[in-house]
Image (cartoon, rainbow, N blue to C red):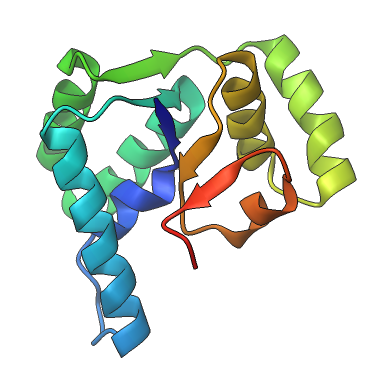
């Protein structure tokens, strides 16, 4: 099982307001490909914090109904495991975020991965490259 970062969903689903560069279009297509694999039942994991981040941003960009449809799909999919994020997780994430100079949600993803035996994450966020014991996919 791989962790799937919120930016995969955002790149795949959000509609850009300007023409994308060649590199940005490549990222968007790769994100769509990863989502297709999830739709074909690849097992992935996410935290409630990342889920909330995705739904809020999709709602702001595409509207309430699209965000609710995405939420319904994510919470009913048997291959998407959603782990809770507790206060204690954030306390640990804060320490890691400061040490590695990453966001709290990136640190939270890392904590979730380590706690659940995951070694790979789908993400375009290069901050995950700082964690030597996990692998970021797609490879840069």
Residue for point 27% across, 67% down: 28
Q: Nearer the viewer, residue 70 or 126?
A: 126
Q: Nearer the viewer, residue 36 or 89?
A: 36
Q: Is residue 21 visible?
A: no
- Where is residue 81, by image quadrant? top left
Q: Quadrant of the N terminus?
A: top left
Q: Is residue 79 left or right of residue 118?
A: left
- Where is residue 70, by image quadrant? top left
Counting from the top left corner in percent of width and height, residue 67 is at: 20, 37
Counting from the top left corner in percent of width and height, residue 82 is at: 39, 17
Residue 39 in the image: above or below residue 30: above
Q: Is residue 92 visible?
A: yes
How many circles with numbers are drawn on the protein?
0
Residue 88 in the image: above or below residue 55: above
Residue for point 63% across, 11% down: 86
Residue for point 82% across, 47% down: 100
Q: Is residue 94 left or right of residue 121?
A: right
- Where is residue 126, by image quadrant? bottom right
Counting from the top left corner in percent of width and height, residue 119 is at: 56, 32
Residue for point 24% across, 72% down: 16
Counting from the top left corner in percent of width and height, residue 104 is at: 69, 38
């Amino acid at each position: 099982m791989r962790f799937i970062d919120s930016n995969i969903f955002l790149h795949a689903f959000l509609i850009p307001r300007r023409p994308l560069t060649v590199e940005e279009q490549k990222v968007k297509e790769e994100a769509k490909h990863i989502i297709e694999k999830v739709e074909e039942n690849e097992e992935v994991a996410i935290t409630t914090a990342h889920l909330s981040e995705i739904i809020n941003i999709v709602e702001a960009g595409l509207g309430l109904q699209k965000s609710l449809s995405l939420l319904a799909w994510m919470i009913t999919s048997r291959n998407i495991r959603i782990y809770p994020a507790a206060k204690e997780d954030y306390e640990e994430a804060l320490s890691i975020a400061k040490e590695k100079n990453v966001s709290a949600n990136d640190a939270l993803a890392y904590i979730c991965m380590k706690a659940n035996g995951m070694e790979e994450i789908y993400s375009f966020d290069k901050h995950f490259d700082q964690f030597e014991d996990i692998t970021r996919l797609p490879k840069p």
